Amino acid sequence: GAGVSQSPRYKVAKRGQDVALRCDPISGHVSLFWYQQALGQGPEFLTYFQNEAQLDKSGLPSDRFFAERPEGSVSTLKIQRTQQEDSAVYLCASSLSGVGANVLTFGAGSRLTVL
Amino acid sequence: GIQVEQSPPDLILQEGANSTLRCNFSDSVNNLQWFHQNPWGQLINLFYIPSGTKQNGRLSATTVATERYSLLYISSSQTTDSGVYFCAVDHTGANSKLTFGKGITLSVRP
């Protein structure tokens, strides 16, 4: 596609519910990233895929967070048993290259509110 | 981890004015990018600039890697320039695990 597409744009969940956020990167982009942006803060790194391989998941805040990219294109970020502190905008980004000079293109984000 | 400091935190300009936004970082970097986040939350990549100088229309950026800072210049500002400007760096060399600064909130008034 022309850009990085994320869905849903807005999600309201009750505490304890599971949520799944989808990212459709730019076609042909090798690298895919998930970031979390709290209100008034800069984005923080969650995880990185090169094709279908998850090369870095050091930013995932707990084992309730899980990400996958099974066919090397679409990615899903899943949050189990959501907590209020999970409320944030979840940003997906992709880049053409696998290493080195990665210029990131971001999606519009998925805003999660946990009540 | 690497520290990224941006200044000033907030900036208010009259339309047509020029401005300089600064990003300091605490370690050598192999990747530095400037982003603009518009009022709707969309992050737009402005520059990939780990060193040197680049220009794109009314915007230009300079990174002095040896002194660990980067500057973003906005000339003849317009109301559409309003939003938050982020500097983000990667020092690992392995991938673009970018560390973002807290951002600079720019308001351009007509």
Image: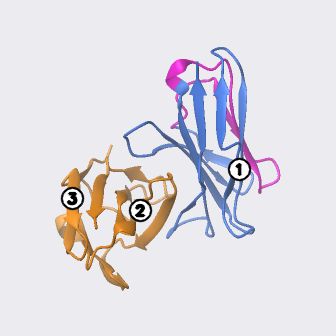
Chain colours: A blue, B orange
Which quadrant is the N terminus of chain B positioned in? top left
> As shown in the figure, which amino acid type bears the numbered disc 2?
His
- The chain identifier of the residue carrying mark 2 reads B
Residue type pointed to by label 3: Ile
Q: Amino acid at mark 1?
A: Ala
In this picture, is A60 found above or below A91? Answer: above
Query: Which residue is drawn at the image coordinates 52% and 29% (left, top)?
Result: A61
Residue B86 visible somewhere in the drawing: no
Residue A81 lies, with reference to residue B84, above or below; the image says: above
Rendered image quadrant of residue A95 = bottom right
Q: Nearer the observer, disc 2 or disc 1?
A: 2
Structural crowding at the residue carrying mark 2, measured as other residues with C-alpha within 10 Å and reported as few (<14), some (14–19) or many (≥20) = many
Residue at 68% over, 63% down: A30
Distance between the Cα atoms at labels 2 and 3? 16 Å
Question: Which marked residue is nearer to the observer: mark 2 or mark 3?
Answer: 3
Residue B93 at what x, y percent from top left? 44, 60
| Element class at badge 2 | strand
Q: CA distance from mark 1 to mark 3?
A: 44 Å
Q: Chain of mark 1?
A: A
Q: Is residue B3 magenta?
A: no
**Residue range (magenta):** A59-85
Residue A11 located left or right of residue B33: right
Residue B100 shows which numbered tag? none
The residue that label 1 is drawn on is: A53
Q: Is residue B96 above or below residue A39?
A: below
In the picture of the structure, the residue carrying the numbered disc 3 is: B12
* Chain of the residue displaying label 3: B
